[in-house]
Image: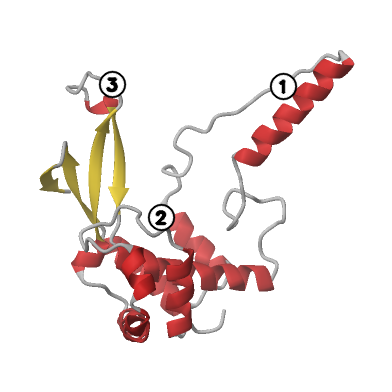
């Protein structure tokens, strides 16, 4: 993979793709403002490049806010909460740029199979199988045929992938070593602030 040099165009493209009013993290910044203040794109590009070269970010950018949303009225059982973590907008912008560069590298070298939709940008990994199932069901019903089907549910599939394997995959796919080292360092800086009913609880 070619070395990553972040430009103002990269920042503009990452900001353009992002939703305007998605909940921000500790920075409290919405993408709407980054889209409007185009003059700051060059500054952000320079600072992103410095962070990439130094392989570190300030803790403000690697700290999320995890909102504990109750699934039902039994608020005493921790298992009845769905955690939703809001990341800082600046961090999401930087990782979006790096993701786009890695995706470009994978596509140009035809690393990923065309049938792999779960991790492909712009793919509809859940919707496509559901549409296929619906069409098959209609055809079977219309033609009065028998159908046997099975579904396999991988519980918390994304949470069960160890970071050591993700790091190894980046090496196998020959992702730029500067990007790999930067992501590894950021992972070590990750932390979150738990928030329950609008009140911040603790840093985990």
In this rendering, the answer to whether 161 lies above or below 190 is above
Find the residue positioned furthest to the right: 143
Residue at (44, 62) in percent of width and height: 18
Asked if labels 3 and 1 touch by Cβ distance under 8 angstroms, the answer is no
First of labels 1, 2 by sequence position: 1
The quarter of the image holding the N terminus is bottom right
Asked if labels 2 and 1 touch by Cβ distance under 8 angstroms, the answer is no
Element type where label 3 sits in the image:
loop
The residue carrying mark 1 is 149
The residue carrying mark 3 is 72
Q: Position of residue 170 (x, y in %)?
A: 51, 66
Element type where label 1 sits in the image:
loop
Lateral position of residue 40 relative to residue 67, left or right: right
The part of the image, by quadrant, that contains residue 151 is top right
The part of the image, by quadrant, that contains residue 33 is bottom left
Asked if residue 91 can be seen in this view, the reply is no
Q: Residues within 10 Å of mark 1 (few under 14, many from 20)?
A: few
């Amino acid at each position: 993979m070619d070395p990553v040099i972040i430009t103002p165009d990269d920042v503009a493209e990452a900001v353009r793709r992002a939703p305007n009013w998605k909940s921000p993290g500790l920075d409290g910044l919405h993408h709407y403002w980054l889209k409007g203040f185009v003059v700051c794109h060059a500054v952000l590009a320079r600072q992103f490049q410095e962070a990439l070269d130094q392989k570190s970010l300030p803790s403000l950018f690697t700290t999320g806010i995890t909102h504990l949303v109750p699934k039902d009225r039994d608020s005493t059982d921790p298992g009845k909460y769905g955690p939703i973590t809001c990341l800082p907008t600046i961090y999401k912008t930087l990782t979006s740029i790096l993701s786009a560069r890695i995706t470009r590298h994978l596509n140009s070298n035809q690393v990923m199979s065309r049938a792999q939709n779960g991790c492909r940008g712009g793919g509809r990994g859940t919707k496509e199988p559901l549409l296929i199932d619906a069409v098959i069901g209609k055809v079977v019903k219309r033609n009065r045929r028998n159908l046997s089907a099975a579904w396999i549910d991988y519980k918390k599939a994304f949470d069960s992938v160890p970071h050591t394997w993700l790091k190894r995959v980046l090496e196998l796919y020959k992702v730029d070593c500067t990007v790999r080292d930067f992501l590894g360092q950021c992972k070590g800086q990750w932390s979150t602030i738990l928030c329950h009913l609008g009140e911040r609880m603790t840093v985990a």
